[in-house]
Each structure stands twice: as structure tokens, then as C-alpha cells.
Image (cartoon, helix red, strand yellow):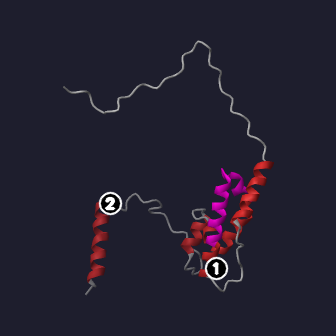
Amino acid sequence: MMDPAVARIESTIEQAMRRGDFDDLPGAGEPLDLPASHDPDWWINQRLANGEIDREALLPVVVLLRKEYERREQTLAALPHERAAREYAEDFTERVHQDRRANPFQTMLAPAWDPEDAARRWRELRAAAPEPAPVPTEPQPPHAPAARSPRRRWWPFGRRT
């Protein structure tokens, strides 16, 4: 006798097969690319090889934080103002401390980042960056009227009396 939960699942699968829910799946009818020896992680290795999974997502948090710290100059250069640089450094440092609390015995540590240091470095990067070139605009002829947006009523319906 079959377990009732297994019977319900089997019945649901059979109904889906009769409806054709599995007919147009990608790779249907193609053989699986299984390794010659037993590998319980064959499916994840195959997805990694096909580029379906970002390899950095598999790294420990501390390694990701250290990589982010190494790219801090590019991140700072893209931020619009000094306050954003401070907030980013505070957020980064909070994530570093969360990782340290979650893994107190790890030997590799990501560095904390002082918000004032981030703001100072942001100012230095802004001072060293070349001024962006102005975007050229097409000159309007002197007799051309300025473009106006059409007037809209503030109510969505016509006036009723």
C-alpha cells in the first residue's frame, strides 16, 4: 500500500502529464550530461560550467567584503555627494561587523572603513577628476516659439451642469 502523501503527489504528476504541462520544457528528450563517476553535485557543477551561476555568489561573505573594499575607489568615484560616501562606508562597516559577529573564529577579516576617511577620499577623487564636458545643445532659431506642453484640466471629466 502506498503512503497517502506519495499517492497524492504521484496523482498530481500524472494529471500534469496528461494536461501536457511537461511537454515543452527545455532539454526535453535530451540525455543528461552525467559524469562518468558518481558526483552528487553534478547538477551544480554543470550549471557553473554553463555560466548560469555567478561564481562570486559562492564565495564566503568575508571574501566578498574584501573584494568590495579593494574596489572602494571606483565605488566612491560613482557616488554623487560626500554624504553618500559616508553612508556607504557606514553600511560597509556594519556588514563587516555583522560578518564578524556571525563568524567569530574566522581567521580572515575584512577591514572596517571609517566614514570620515571615505568622505575625505571622495573629496580627493572629485578634485582629481576632470570636469565633464558640457552636453552640446542645438541652437534654436530666434523666431521659433518655445515648445509648450498642452494644458491639462485638473479634473478628469468634463463639466456637468
Disc 2 residue crowd, few under 14, some 14–19, many 20+, Cα 10 Å? few
Instruction: Identify which residue, 157 or 120, lies in the foreground.
Output: 120
| Residue segment shown in magenta | 73-95
Residue type at mark 2 is: Gly
- 79 or 40: nearer the eye? 79
Question: Is residue 14 on the magenta stretch?
Answer: no
Name the residue tied to disc 2: 20
Disc 1 packing (10 Å; few <14; some 14–19; many ≥20): some
Percent across and percent down for residue 35 are 58, 75
Q: Residue at x 60, y 63 (%)?
A: 50
From where the camera sits, is residue 55 visible?
A: no
The three-letter amino acid code for the residue at tag 1 is Arg
User: Does 39 sit above or below residue 82?
Assistant: below
Judge whether residue 159 can be spotted in this image.
Answer: yes
Q: Which residue is mark 1?
A: 100
Toward which corner of the image does residue 89 lie, by quadrant? bottom right
Tell me the number on the disc at residue 145: none
Give the farthest residue toward the top: 143
Label 2 and label 1: CA atoms lie apart by 51 Å
Q: Quadrant of the C terminus?
A: top left
Q: Which residue is located at x 65 percent, y 56 percent?
A: 83
